[in-house]
Amino acid sequence: MSYFISEIKNIISADLLMQGDDALIENLLTDSRKLLFPESSLFFALQGEGRSGASFIKALYDKGVRNFVTDTRRNEKDNAPYAGANFLIVPNVLKALQQLAGYHRHQFKIPVIGITGSNGKTIVKEWLNQILAETFNIVRSPKSYNSQVGVPLSLWRMNESNELGIFESGISRPGEMQHLQEMIDPEIGVVTFIGSAHAEGFTGKEQKIHEKLQLFTNSKQLVFCSDDETIVNAVNAFSQTENTGIKKFSWGRNPGADLLVTQIKKKEGLSEISCSFDERVFTFSIPFTDEASVNNCLACCCILLILKIDTGVITERMLQLRPVEMRLEMKQGINNCSVINDGYSADLNSLGIALDFLEQQKHHKKRTVILSDVPAAAKEVPALYKKIAAALSQKNIYRFIGIGPLLAEHRDLFSGVADTVFYDSTESFIPEIPALDFHNETILLKGARVFRFEKISNALEHKVHETLLEINLNALRHNLKVYRQHIGNDVKVMAMVKAFSYGSGSFEIANLLQHAGVEYLAVAYADEGADLRRSGITLPLMVMNTEPSGFESILKYSLEPEIYSFNILNEFRAFLSHKNITQYPVHIKIDTGMHRLGFEENDMEALCSTLAEDNSFKIISVFSHLAASDAAAHDDFTEQQAGIFNRAADKIKTFLGYDFIRHVANSSAIFRHPGLQMDMVRIGIGFTADASPRCSIACNTSPH
């Protein structure tokens, strides 16, 4: 379903500044990096952490987007550069996004399942999809899109062909669930495990459960575990005061549960679960033995019984459940390739997510997509494959391999990709892998379940036995978001990636930080920076330990050296002079009391004179290290360091006649000394330490 701009104006009660056609909108965009279809996209300029979405309007306009929702009132001068663009002006962009998604969701009368809890939401949703996909045409939240922004983007995926909706919702503070309820408005509700995750916004477990139950204000049925007394009490109170018509459906081991678990036997990687329901006894097995998986399967079983799925079908499909990848993962492939395996689903929306992830990977210049036929009604096929072809062209794919008769039939649509090849089936493709010469490329596998892409994955992945250091990139991204919330809007972030060197994930971490919007990276040595450049990292890179042996690499890979002494300054200047290079970007380090490396305050006259002798250097930043910003006992010394630094930086600015970035604040100073954030902050250990009560990076070694 799509809507004209004039219709959307009324739905979200916006003021419309129309300078172009009454465009037909099919795609909602909140992240400029995820653009696929410019002409049919509506960009919501949300206020982000430290930056406004309005700052991306110009870049999106240049890429062909002509429709925007913003809370910034615009005048003729503002709109002069945007000929043909339409602006919907609203008081609150996020609320407008939610209003539009809620309106869209309520155009469909299909059953909708809403899932909330602290843990298990995504697992239950994905397992329900695995079990029910053969019975219903399902629309569901992609991955863990359960936030105030993720939910509306999920609901927008609903269309006339869907027969069942499954959406998860997550909150971190009181009052948020009401907005999600108004959008999802589920007929059937599921409460999964309630634990400590996201607990810091609530006074206790009882308040958190009460807030989560608000999702089910209008629901007809609610699934929950009767073994948790706190949940039982909360559900009983909710059903007596806030939704008196709701029908409770519980599972548990205690008598009185609607789905009574009578026995669980675990052996050889399987759990055999015996249950009693409505005076019937049945048994099913699942290919998991951990307690969380057992609980999640029992929640799924309740939903299946509510939907009147036969117990024989339940028994058959429960045994076929597969582990759920919580995020797209990249694995080492044959011939120095990287393989992204997303081979259990194929639809246009999830393809967009997978293509975004593929685009983030910079390790190889060449990107290959292997895609199966996408299930669709016959009348939708031509338009669907035209959109898929357009999405691939938008992402500059090097090679496209289509598997399935429909892709082969529509091969002419894919002329925008330089190298294309088509096969009728997975079985006909696999023998051709050696001839296709996969080398030094990133390969995305995206296939519907029936095409069994796990066979392709097995053929392309490099088989190794080694010990791996596992770094939770989601936790790192979360820590960065927490820091963004505590720094000024115009303050840049320099990430210290030197601590992740020596085989423990420098590229993966640098790649994530680059995609997350960090402005600068810092490495210990020039060879580390060279490795990152060869892997596709394009961010400015400061080299902290500048040595003459690294000068060639600094120049070759456009690295920016830290200048910390007169010796290194003069040697690098002589090197640049020999190469006939001027205005090379460098960073000047000031020693304000740590007494390691750097120019001291009494060196400023000589330093400024040396810098002014020729135009070898362009000073990008002047910085210093705080010795004890994390210790209250040394706050006076920290302030003393700041004073020395500011005097030195002011003198350099006066002498040079131009300004530069100033930075002294490290991870702890961001919180303890916010006045010292200046133009940029440096985060190192803060990525791996707790940036909030629920931040961490999980590092585990395990055989693989």
Image: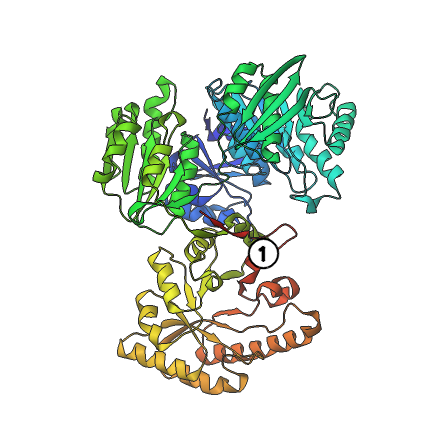
Q: Is residue 84 something one can see in this rendering? A: no
Q: Nearer the viewer, residue 166 or 130?
A: 130
Which SS class for mark 1? helix
**Rendering coords of residue 191 (x, y %):** 65, 30
Q: Is residue 207 left or right of residue 317?
A: right
Reply above or below: 169 against 544: above
Q: Nearer the viewer, residue 612 or 403?
A: 403
Q: Nearer the viewer, residue 574 or 248?
A: 248
Q: Pointer 1: what residue?
A: 483
**Rendering coords of residue 111 (x, y %):** 57, 19
Q: Pick out the residue farthest to the front.
A: 267
Tell me the amino acid under the disc marked 1. Answer: Tyr
Reply above or below: 646 against 339: below
Q: Which quarter of the figure has residue 527?
A: bottom left
Q: Which quarter of the figure has residue 182?
A: top right
Q: Pick out the residue farthest to the left.
A: 435
Q: Residue at x 61, y 66 (%)?
A: 669
Q: Is residue 563 something one can see in this rendering? A: yes
